[in-house]
Image (spheres, rainbow, N blue to C red):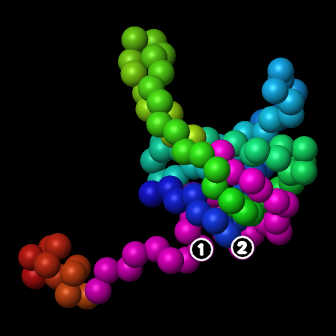
């Protein structure tokens, strides 16, 4: 699971950034803890976060789901555009939701395994 939320802190060791026709841009790929899923987190204020080791989401401005073709296969692209600020690394990892992960009860586990 990947959750991008206001107040969330995300690692950005593999941030990509540059200059385009519309100005500076920055992209952070937020990856799931397991599997291959990811969400592209675009900074609307790229100049203020370039070089940061972690960022905090201040405001979500846009979300987008699109499809692209690569090698004859279609893939979903999930993107979020947000206003970000530099943050301290380590409080929350990429794709994490700050410890609010769902923990099933013992009864739920028993039902799952039909015990």
Is the residue 100 above or below the residue 79 in the image?
Answer: below
Determine whether, in the image, residue 25 is placed left or right of residue 81.
right
Q: Quadrant of residue 20?
A: top right
- Asked whether the viewer can see residue 33, the reply is no
Horizontal and vertical percent position of residue 115: 10, 82
**CB atoms of marks 2 and 1 within 8 Å:** yes
Q: Any mark on residue 79, and which?
A: none
Determine the residue positioned at 59% across, 46% down. Answer: 62
The extreme top residue here reads: 72
Residue shown at 55%/77% (left/top)? 99
| Residues in magenta, as a range | 81-105
Dot 1 surroundings within 10 Å: few (below 14), some, or many (20 or more)? some
Q: Nearer the viewer, residue 74 or 67?
A: 67
Query: Which residue in the structure is indicated by mark 2?
Result: 91
Residue 103, given in percent of the width and then of the height, sits at 38, 79
Q: Residue at x 39, y 18 (%)?
A: 73
């Amino acid at each position: 699971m990947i959750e991008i939320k206001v107040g969330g802190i995300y690692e950005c060791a593999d941030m990509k950034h540059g200059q385009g026709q519309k100005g500076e841009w920055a992209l952070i790929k937020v990856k799931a803890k397991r599997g291959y899923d990811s969400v592209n987190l675009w900074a609307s204020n790229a100049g203020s976060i370039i070089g940061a080791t972690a960022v905090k989401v201040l405001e979500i401005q846009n979300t987008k789901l699109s499809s692209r073709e690569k090698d004859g296969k279609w893939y979903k692209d999930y993107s979020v555009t947000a206003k970000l600020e530099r943050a301290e690394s380590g409080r929350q990892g990429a794709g994490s939701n700050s410890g609010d992960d769902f923990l099933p009860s013992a009864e739920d586990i028993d039902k799952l395994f039909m015990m």
